[in-house]
Image (cartoon, rainbow, N blue to C red):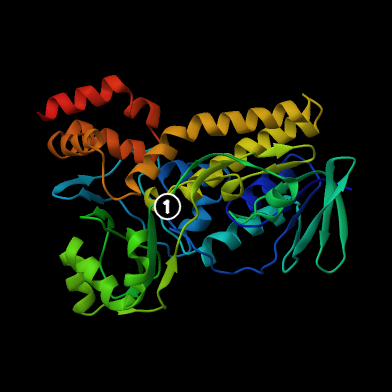
Amino acid sequence: MYDAIVVGARCAGSPVAMLLARRGHRVLLVDKVTQPSDTVSTHYIQQYGLRKLKEWDLLDTLAGTGVTPMRRMTISYRDSLIEGFADPLDGIDVTYAPRRTVLDPILLEAADAAGAEVRQGHAVRELIVEDGRVAGVQGADGTRDRASVVIGADGSGSLVARQAGAEIYRSLPAESFVYYSYWSGLDIHFHSRIGVDQQVGAWPTGDGGTLIAIMKPLSRWDEFRSDVEGNFLQVVKDVVPDIAEQIAGGGERTEPFHGIRYPDNYYRRSHGPGWALVGDAGYHKDPITGQGISDAFVHAELLADRLHEGLAGERPMAEALADYERERDERTLSAFKFAATIGALKLPPELEAVFNALGREPEYARDFFNLIAGAITGERFFAPENVARMIGAAK
């Protein structure tokens, strides 16, 4: 009998298992794949995500893998451009975008080192439900394991969510699709550049590799797929000609193109009798802001804290898990709405005016970079009085 079974051993599930095991709980961590294994990802980890790795004594391990440090960002919307970087956050003055074949094994090994039992290549077939309560999992191999709580960290298509009946209670439609691949031979810092109905994101990963991604409206999906490489390179040329010149002048694509139609933005009910959800299983927003990994770290720790309270008998488990969901939602709602808005690749007039102000006023640009870093909350940056102040100063 386990205290917790975690289904999914990536950037949400492994930290939950690690943190619970470090507190002395008996934890089983299972995943249908075996690490190292790649997955769809923006790779980017903001300073607030790196702060969690530092607190967990994993940041130096990541930094030692050959991942490229970034200390410069270029962000643009149409003709408005800002450059700079956030202030150090708890001494962290860089960001990283590691390949998931590098990051996920580090997290999994940390869970194992903390004392969690790890089973890789172990697919879950169904939840064990008794008297209306989730009581464990049954593997595809017939193995049955029981626990006080089962945690779904198994992504947007979560089996745990589906079988537990976790409904979506807030949703905003996805507006765009993404194509991306990797190049060698480029010298690029962080870019997030929005042109007319298209976006280019580019940043180094590690060992000389660079991720380049484009976004276009969903209505252009079929047209784009008729010539992926030609259309991809044309978007880069239209939006960031300097990067297109580097590609043409010696960049080498090292992997096939990956195309994704992301699911809608959503909040899914993330707790119930004997179960909880974390990461994309419970909450997903447009990837344009690249916050998925950092949010997964933060929410993994929040869930682990609340689970510990319930498992240790400090408060009723149902109450603790309800607080987890409430706190997660309160901390993320402004970022959720912002990501969905800019994911449409066309800013409403008020936000466009704010972005124009960022390009003209270094003070506001600095606040924006600190927002990205996690040092300033979205509620503070987008407070009506602050937005009015920025727009007024830009006129």
Asked whether, in this view, residue 10 is left or right of residue 89, the answer is right
Residue at x 25%, y 26% (from the top left corner): 387
Of residue 126 and residue 6, the one placed in the foreground of this image is 126
Q: Position of residue 45 (x, y in %)?
A: 44, 51
- The reply, left or right, for residue 139 in relation to residue 11 is right
Q: Please give the residue where the numbered disc 1 appears in the rendered image.
A: 287
Q: Residue furthest top?
A: 385
Q: Secondary structure at mark 1?
A: helix
- Are there few (<14), some (14-19), or many (20+) residues within 10 Å of tag 1? some
- Location of residue 360 with respect to 196 vertically, above or below: above
- Answer with left or right where residue 75 lies relative to residue 103: left
In the rendered image, is residue 181 in sight?
A: yes
* Image x and y of residue 313, in percent: 82, 27
Say whether residue 54 is visible.
no
| Relative height, residue 298 to residue 211 (above, below) | above
Q: Residue at x 53, y 60 (%)?
A: 103
Amino acid type, label 1: Pro
Which residue is painted at 32% across and 28% down in the image? 382
Q: Which residue is drawn at the image coordinates 26% and 77% (left, top)?
A: 230
Give residue 172's position: percent from left, percent from top.
46, 43
96 or 247, nearer to the observer: 247
Residue 262 placement (x, y as % from top left):
47, 57
